[in-house]
Image (tube, rainbow, N blue to C red):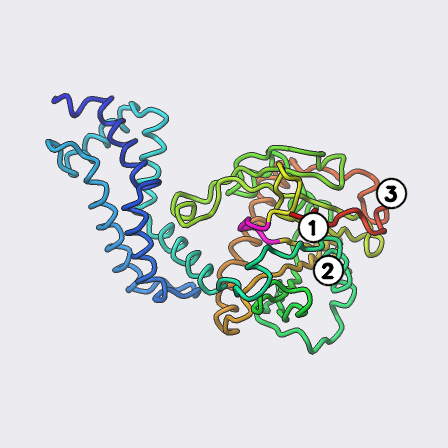
Amino acid sequence: VSMSASRANVEAILAAMADLVQGGSAFASWRQEFVSKHVDEFDYGEENKLSYTAIHERYCDGVETALARALPSDITMDTFCELVKSHIEGGELGEVSTEAVAILLEAGDFRAFREMMLFEKSQLDAGAPEASLEYGRGETVPQIDELMTLCAQLRMAADAEDATWTNVLANDWIRIDKKPVEPERRSSASEIYLRGVWTMGLSYEEACDMMLSQDDRRALWDVNCKKITHLRGHPDTDDDFITTAHLDFGFMLHLAGVPREMTSRSILRWNFPRAGIVTYALAPWDAKADAYDAQSILQIKTGTIETHPTDPQRCIMTTLETNRMGSMPKFMLSGLLSFTAPQIMRGLEQRYIAKVRKAGKSKPLLARRRPGGATREDDCSAAPAHAAST
């Protein structure tokens, strides 16, 4: 066996390949050009078209060509693949090379590739904010408290007819509507509200645990969350706390711009707007500046959770968020939501039932947080939840 085939050299080559794909400017430029050329051929439907396979094969060819640059002159790609296989079977890979192999395997995974292309498409479809508006001179600071109050009001009026909302998705467990954000509040001409009403097969306490708990149990049902770091306050005892979620969405999505860490501020109001309902807000947060993080990929999300009116083993969740997808055609927005909503919400619910409920790992709510339980003085008043100015 030549020196080039030694364990140390195999690991060094793997590490060099991973660095090339993750941080190489030449690869990044090629990848972005490839995505720009082909992203319009993808849609949000569930069908995997034959054209997707052909595009993925060309992508794999491009990745392999790029990786070959990290090989010594005396080793071909086929030979190197056999060496890696031998090292894996012999359990000889180190920590760095194990991560590198995972990255390289995912680069050839069709599902990961499709998710990357659809993420890139969603970013393009959302559109960049118009330079003539306040985004060009520093974002308007969102008023978290106002959004929480608006979300609560929407819940109380959920059954009322409102012609200002347009339905974009409806089935037996979810309804999503949209409407433009008021001109005086929006930071982009295409900014819209998205309101969701979800019927979940979880009790009130289970739904609160799944949606609001921020601890390491979260990895049981949220497969992208690997760890939670508490920066200020704690969700077990506080209704205003800051955490950092350490994430793994897969190499392809991180390559497309999804961060590996997200810091957020969570604010909860129990028994608001009436007994038995919790209203929550999740906002991107700059912990160092203790201010709203306008540069984060995360958007402010608010919601309410309550017991289903006829079945105590189910609950209803109303969500409200803003985004800049208002210029997207209705059929396209519906397609995007049809693709993402079932994956995210149904996936969370099903994993929670399988790995938490059935394993007896649910965390009970404090007495004051149960439906109709005692409240603190500020639970139903305007909490000091306004985001600080950046």
Is residue 202 toward the left or the right of residue 87 in the image?
right
Q: Identify the residue under disc 3.
A: 376
SS type, badge 1: strand
**Residue occupying image coordinates x 37% and y 26%:** 95
Q: Quadrant of residue 176?
A: bottom right
- Residue 151's label in the rendered image is 2
Question: Magenta includes 253?
Answer: no
Q: What's under tag 1, amino acid-wise?
A: Ala
Q: Quadrant of residue 101?
A: top left
Q: Of marks 1 and 2, which one's residue comes earlier in the chain?
A: 2
Picture layout, residue 356 above or below residue 115:
above
**Residue occupying image coordinates x 68% and y 48%:** 389
Image marks 1 and 2: residues in contact by CB distance under 8 Å: yes
Q: What's under tag 2, amino acid-wise?
A: Cys
The outermost residue toward the front is: 137
Classified by dominant secondary structure, the portion drawn in magenta counts as loop
* Between 76 and 105, the one nearer to me in the picture: 76
